[in-house]
Image (cartoon, rainbow, N blue to C red):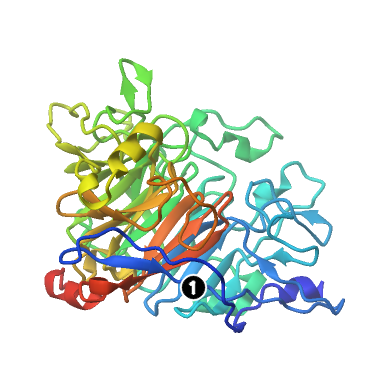
Amino acid sequence: MRARQLAFVGGAVLGLLAICGWHTGVWADNNQQPAFQVDPDWPKPLPAPVGNDGIAHPWVQGEVAGSCVDMHDNVYTFNRGWEVGATVNGTLQGNESGAINGNDATASAIPSPPIVAFDRDGNTVAGWGNPALYPATQVDGGYASYLPHGAHGCYVDYQGYIWVGGNGDGIVQKYNPSVAAQMGAAATFVTQIGTKGTCDTTAPPASGANPFTSCNETNDANTSHTLLNEPPDIAVDPLADPVTHTPGSVYIADGYGNHRVVVYTTADGGKTYQYNRQWGTTCMIGGVATNSQACPAGTFGATGGGHPHCVVLGNDGNVYVCDRPNSRIQVFDRSCGAPSTTATPQPLCAPKKIINIGLNAGQTPLTGSVVVGNNAFQNADEAIPGAQEAILASLTTRACDIDFWPNDDYLATRSPTSQKIIVDVDLGNDNTWLIDRATSMVFGALGVCGILPCPGHNAGHFAFGHTTAVDSQGDIYVAETITGRRVQKFVPVQNGNQNGHQNGNQNGNQQ
């Protein structure tokens, strides 16, 4: 038992491991746009605590689902190493696809804590989270973890709290990271929105059935004021809410079961949260639930998860939402939405802009409005020769997650940076695109997959890139799930250092 406890202590600092790999940078206009290269030596090796058996038990994260950055530029990952495939103390760790296995672990390896924190140098500085399960004799016991099942997004807010969400149940949780790091495996949340094992659904589970069977897109009610349905991402607004005029509103991408963005507000500084408004519904074309970039503006792809997949607050007063099945980013005003009512159960909101990460550039208008969309790759060949043909003719695209660059992530709408670039993780073709926010056009990429045949798992290549985060120094972090199972760091180079955080302060929101 002691070995298990040691696996969840933080503060380990290990020596530098030199990883062989080539450096890759973006194709960019040296006079206008930043350039980046991968840091192959980040992060440093994870801790390997020695158990009572006298054997070192190295941590393995498995799939790294979420990535987020705090005000001190510590990088947090929310990972799935504990969710399936590994037996700890005789208990199989869950039923998700993300656990450690023979491809990335030795016989003595153990799942890392669900949440692992690194400093900018790549040292592991904390590990915590409660992966406690129901007794192994119970059906689908893995779903009953204390944390959100199906580890997904994480976000550090302006007060320093870390939020996590999952695509396997109906909750998002808020933690105090400094307290949680001290508590290790005993860490408990400060606040939870939603109810564990109970989702916003049209088909409640039968009596005695696994309650989580109701949590999926086929049971989409999209209307509850208290329940969520597989929410993958969260963002917190430090500015006064445009409706309630109090700071701290929580925007949730309620988008693996439901098809909406839902906003909870607070009147007591973040101790409690109340439902305020929502917007979005399933895309219908000709009466058929559909995935298409021709979906009506303001709706989200019908199936396949991630509808929506990310929610990000810009300092331009807008809410950027990843409509992953339709591979597009919809941009809304912060004041969007209304409460779900019997008369209007699924309120809609017209986006200000749609950025299509793919072949098409049009969508049908919403309630008579006209929304101008664009193909983000329209002029990509100017910066990435041959990219448009290679990407759009032979591969799929999928707008999975975004962040801004340069950016102070935790300040969100108050970030004093220019936020001139949108960093877009594309799960469809294993690349991360750099998009000029002003023009909504792709000008570069962090990797080469999707442009050239992907050469594999070397530094700077991607396999199932899932989320991204930017620190205050302009470094970009990309977390990979499924076959990638790691987090990589890209640092500004060339003129990127000149166009980074310092210059961004001159043009951004100074609030």
User: Where in the figure is residue 129, as x and y percent of width and height?
Assistant: 61, 66
Q: Nearer the viewer, residue 55 or 508?
A: 55
Q: Nearer the viewer, residue 187 or 113?
A: 113
Q: Is residue 90 above or below residue 506?
A: above
Position of 185 compared to 291: left or right?
A: right
Q: Which residue is mark 1?
A: 176
User: Where in the figure is residue 491, as x and y percent of width and height?
Assistant: 37, 71
Task: For residue 316, say whether it is visible.
Answer: yes
For image coordinates 46% across by 52% down, the residue present is 466
Work out which residue is located at the far top of the displayed protein and give it. Answer: 286
* Mark 1 burial class by Cα count in 10 Å: few <14, some 14-19, many 20+: some
Q: Is residue 154 above or below residue 289?
A: below
Q: Is residue 138 above or below residue 444?
A: above
Task: For residue 192, say whether it is visible.
Answer: no
Q: Secondary structure at mark 1?
A: loop
For image coordinates 25% across by 28% down, the residue present is 296
For image coordinates 19% across by 72% down, the residue present is 504
Position of 79 compared to 328: left or right?
A: right
